[in-house]
Image (cartoon, grey):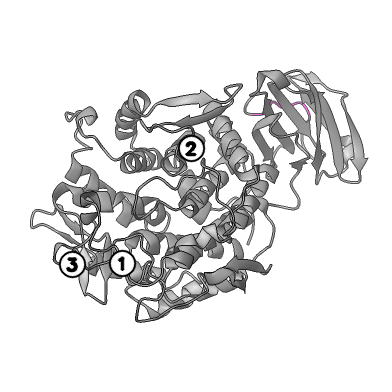
Amino acid sequence: MSTRAVTPQEATPTPALNDRALGWLRFIWDKATTPDDWSDQGEPLPWWDRYTAPPMCSFPRFDVHNMSYVLPVMLEATPAWREVYTRISDELVRRYTSFWGAVDWCTLIGPDPGADRYPPAWQAFIPEPLRGRYTVPGWTGNGIEPWGLQPDPCGADGNVFYRGWLNLVLGIRRYVSGEATEHQPLEITGYQNRQFTWTHARIAEFISAQFRSRPQGPHCENTKIWPFCVSATGLGLKLYDAQLGTNLSEPVPRWFDYLRRHYMSLTRSGELRTFALYYDPMEQRLHSLPGPSVAHGVFPCLLYMYPQDREFSLWIYELAMRRLGWSDPDLPLSRLQADPNHLSTAMWMAHEVKDTATEDRIRDYIENTYQPRFFGEENDRFGFWFGYDSTWPRGQVNATLMLAECGTPGAWWRIFNDPLLASPSEPQLHGVDYPNISIRRAQNDMAQRVLNIETAAPAPSQRGKPTSFTIDQLPSPAEVSVTVDNQDSTGWHVTSGDSIRLDLDIGDHQIRVAFPGGSSRQNSPHT
């Protein structure tokens, strides 16, 4: 597959990462690179979000995969600087494949003995005739028939919400690194600490085969089929195909057609009547929330459906917004007491598709209600608190909202449909002293043969200190010209046959590196 060149026309509207984006990147760097023990003898640090959306999503694995989504979105501003995203992705994969990554599959064995004692708030997730004897969503139920106990969390008949999101995280890791890692072995921890060896390629092929053999969709918890999980699983296949030129996602559109015909329905007037939270083929029951709440089954799916089926996603988004009244400009959002996960997804979707009026309306509510703030000793981290009494910003609810903070409209769709793949012929930054210095923007304008870089010093204590980084993959590095803040710079020297080292101080700088083949004096779009 060919890479997508960044032309001047594309580069101009792509902004540098703003302060909020840099602050969120700094916090997820902290989380990813601070050692903690995800084995069965340890426990994740408390800033890993295993508190949100119980009983279904209150596992730290959900924070891990949600945290990865912003990385390829940020890459649009810095495609010539990938190392920070690669390091974060490596740490996410390491945690995902650990005991705590599959803690539910390894510990929630068989039917839930507490099925008759669920709190009232959980009963809404169970069909009324089954309450008191049916396992609540979130109880994975390894060992439940028809498959019995399966020690491998990745190769099980059920548990697609484990391997489906692992495949997506691995795809994101490959995307941001530009490295062909799909055949590297992965050791995945399963039941009783047994180790199972997989590769990214084998996982993707296994998932594709499941889609082909199961038109209803693969199971998540035994024995529930969730559009939420299945659509995310399909998206991981789409990203795999987008990077490797394969066709493993070929059966997924047939599942979308099955969803339309069997997992949702409309009223006679064309309003959304049902949308499956899940379908249980053993019980032959579809469970949908009642009344306007039915729309809350749609929002978790939109992030995953939209890059795969834009037309359907826009239609179901509009149905859900209308069902809740969120598209009515005369209805004050402040009266809705909306789930922050779903309202954040609505704002992201409005941002993604340039529904500016809706985005502005929801953003105003979020800015005034969801407590955005910088934090940390030097106020160089950022997050939303959403009214939670917590030391750290909740990872799961921040993850979707930060997509709108960190990318331009259409950024999420482009990752899967017009990917920005790494090129061995374009200059790249390496050895950046992150997090002491941040990179707001690092883009090659290959038409003009210029690399444009913007740096920042988020932590006041680091400002003015000396730093350096390498720019490699340069043709004839001795012939480059470098300007820093529109002044010719001599603070660089050739280090090898294709690289230079640039010395400067930590601060807010605009750097322009012109390399052979283009004009060394033409201004970049940001100068």
Amino acid type, mark 2:
Thr
Residue at left offset 32%, top offset 66%: 112
Amino acid type, mark 3:
Leu
Confirm whether residue 247 shows in the render: no
* Chain-order first, disc 1 or disc 2: 1
Q: Which of marks 2 and 3 is in front?
A: 3
Which of 303/277 is in front?
A: 277
Alpha-carbon neighbours of circle 1 within 10 Å: few (<14), some, or many (≥20)?
few
The residue stretch that appears in magenta = 519-524
Vertical arrangement, residue 131 with respect to residue 49, above or below: below
- The residue identified by callout 3 is 130
Which of 432/127 is in front?
A: 127
Which of 521/438 is in front?
A: 438
Label 3, secondary structure: give it: helix
Q: Going by the image, does 247 lie left or right of 520?
A: left
Query: Residue 109 sits in which quadrant?
Result: bottom left
Q: Horizontal and vertical percent for residue 335? A: 19, 30
Q: Horizontal and vertical percent for residue 393? A: 47, 35
Residue 94 inside the magenta-drawn segment: no
Vertical arrangement, residue 182 with respect to residue 29, above or below: below
- The residue identified by callout 2 is 408
Alpha-carbon neighbours of circle 2 within 10 Å: few (<14), some, or many (≥20)?
many
Label 2, secondary structure: give it: loop
Extreme-left residue of the structure: 268
Alpha-carbon neighbours of circle 3 within 10 Å: few (<14), some, or many (≥20)?
few
* Chain-order first, disc 2 or disc 3: 3
Label 1, secondary structure: give it: loop
- The residue identified by callout 1 is 113
Q: Horizontal and vertical percent for residue 214? A: 37, 78
**Do tag 1 and tag 2 residues touch (Cβ < 8 Å)?**
no
Query: Residue 256 sits in which quadrant?
Result: bottom left
Q: Nearer the viewer, mark 1 or mark 2?
A: 1
